[in-house]
Amino acid sequence: MAREFRRVVTQYLERPNRPGVRLTNFWIERGSPAEFDGSTETCTGGFVLHPPHLGSTFRCVEFLPEDPEVLKTLDGKTAFGEMGASANVVEDARHPFMHRTDSLDYAIVLTGEIWMMMDEEEDDLLLKAGDVLVQRGNNHAWSNRGTEPCVIAFVLVDGVSQRDAPEDRQKGIHR
């Protein structure tokens, strides 16, 4: 018989500036190499979008179906600002939550389906339960256009655009 695993969650974020989305952190590693004899609880402090410097974050995000009328009234900079990431929102994008993270992200769609919106509509991807995504610091937004919730497991690993880029150009959106 298969063993069931349990992780008690201590940190999640739901907010009115991004209705229908709940982020749940399971583990935050604050450096590399990872410390396996360290703290037994790492999900402390404020909720931040990015993983710590040289660290990683393991989380799940639940996306309820979007209401296009509500979406038109929302401000992505304000919502991402609550997670310390207002500068990562793409200005004048086709979705208010189009953003770029300074991380390499591994994602697995656990339930439902969701559109990963890209800069250009022809590049948008429909992801379904079981799909795996490796995201490398690209502009994107998540859009649940379906009728069922979508849950995605993410591991975000701190990253830079290029290791040999000038320090002021290694992170963030550059135009």
Image (spheres, helix red, strand yellow):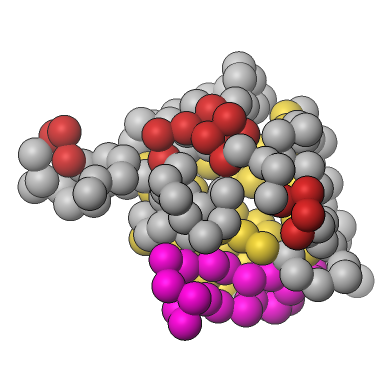
Residue 72 belongs to the span the image colors magenta: no
Work out whether 102 lies above or below 118.
above
Q: Is residue 83 visible?
A: no
Vertical comparison of 11 with 120: above or below:
above
Question: Which residue occupies 61% across, 60% down?
Answer: 142
On screen, residue 87 versus residue 84, left or right, reads: left
Q: Picture coordinates of residue 161 (x, y %)? A: 23, 51
The residue furthest top is 45
Number of numbered discs present?
A: 0
48 or 77, which is in the foreground? 77
Q: Is residue 149 above or below residue 28?
A: below
x and y percent of residue 95 in the render?
57, 56
Residue name at image x 81 percent, y 36 percent: 8
Judged from this view, the residue extending furthest toward the bottom is 122
Residue at screen point 41% across, 57% down: 139
Q: Does the magenta portion include 129?
A: yes
Magenta-colored span = 109-130
Between 36 and 93, the one nearer to me in the picture: 93
Q: Position of residue 23 (x, y in %)?
A: 70, 42
Location of the N terminus by quadrant is bottom right
Q: Which of the two residues, 171 or 57, is positioned nearer the viewer here?
A: 171
The picture quadrant where one finds residue 169 is top left
* Residue occupying the point 47% across, 33% down: 85
Say if residue 118 shows up in the picture: yes
Quadrant assignment, res 41: top right
Q: In front here: 157 or 161?
A: 161
Tell me: 137 left or right of 134: left
